[in-house]
Image (cartoon, grey):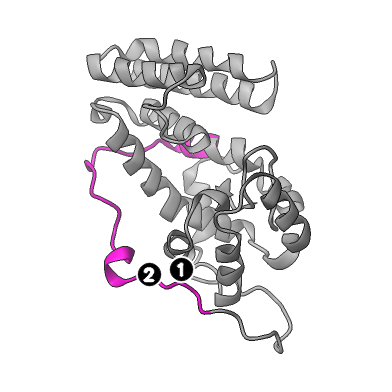
Amino acid sequence: MANGLSYLITRLFPSQTDTAHPSSGPSNTPTQPAISKPTASAVSSPAPVSKKLTISDGAFNLIVREEDGSEAYYTRHYTHFEWPAGASGPTIGIGYDCGYVTRMEAAIDWDGIVDTRTLQHIQDACGKKGSSAEEWVRRNRGSVTIPWDQAIKEFRGREVPKWIGRVSRSLPHTDQLSPDSFGALVSLAYNRGASFDLPGARFSEMREIKHCMIVGQYARIPAEIRSMKRLWRPNSDLWNRREHEAQLFERGLVKS
């Protein structure tokens, strides 16, 4: 895993130019359906949020590590479509779940990063979830190849700003948190969605985190993150991720 965001930036922008990596494929492929293109207004920046809102290098690297491990592991396992199981959709890049984005969103997220043919396949995967996604991935796993540099570029330039916006719109007072603590909540939401208002026992801690943000009891939040570990098998990936997020939030409290 890269040590720090500065290394990732160096990997991404060695010459300060945007470089697409077209996927290989036969030149005589059949004519593809027209790709959904975003309108000028759709491509505009996400809804503005406070300039103070950012996530730390530690938070950025935590999300990348929890989603895909190291660059070497990603290259061995995640350059093509994968299906993580359950209600997931076809997944690429740094935990980019096509099942939960529209064709238009995919066009905005990947425009200028992948070539037209790859974008078409990404859009074809949009909206597929669960068993239908599993079958789709079985038949189309190798239809795209997303190198590590493209995956990191999309995540850093598109997903991080998107989820900073989603979390800040879902929770009050996020500008009172340090980049470590706020980044822990971005990691949590990137994995579980911005589900701070959903009903049911499964989301009770998410609702309580929102309450803590409303009343300014930030020191209670790590315990709520740890309480979510009840949802997963001990020492499983997500069980450990919640612990790592709680620890990151606590480090941020010390720095605040």
Categorize mark 1 by other alpha carbons within 10 Å: few (<14), some (14-19), many (20+). Answer: some
Query: Was residue 17 drawn as part of the magenta stretch in this picture?
Result: no
Q: x and y percent of residue 105 in the render? A: 43, 59
In the picture provided, is 66 more to the left or to the right than 163? right
Q: Quadrant of the N terminus?
A: top right
Q: x and y percent of residue 176 in the render? A: 24, 25
Q: Identify which amino acid the numbered label 2 is placed on.
A: Pro
Q: x and y percent of residue 58 in the render? A: 48, 33
Residue drawn 63% across and 61% down? 146
Q: x and y percent of residue 189 in the render? A: 45, 33
Q: Is residue 10 visible?
A: no
- Tell me the mark number nearer the camera, choosing from 2 and 1: 2
Label pair 2/1, CB-CB below 8 angstroms: yes
Disc 2 target residue: 38
Q: Examine the rendered structure and indicate whether residue 213 appears above or below residue 189.
A: above
User: Where, by quadrant of the figure, is residue 142 drawn?
Assistant: bottom right
* Secondary structure state at the residue bearing disc 2: loop
Badge 2 or badge 1: first in the primary sequence: 2
Q: Identify which amino acid the numbered label 1 is placed on.
A: Asp
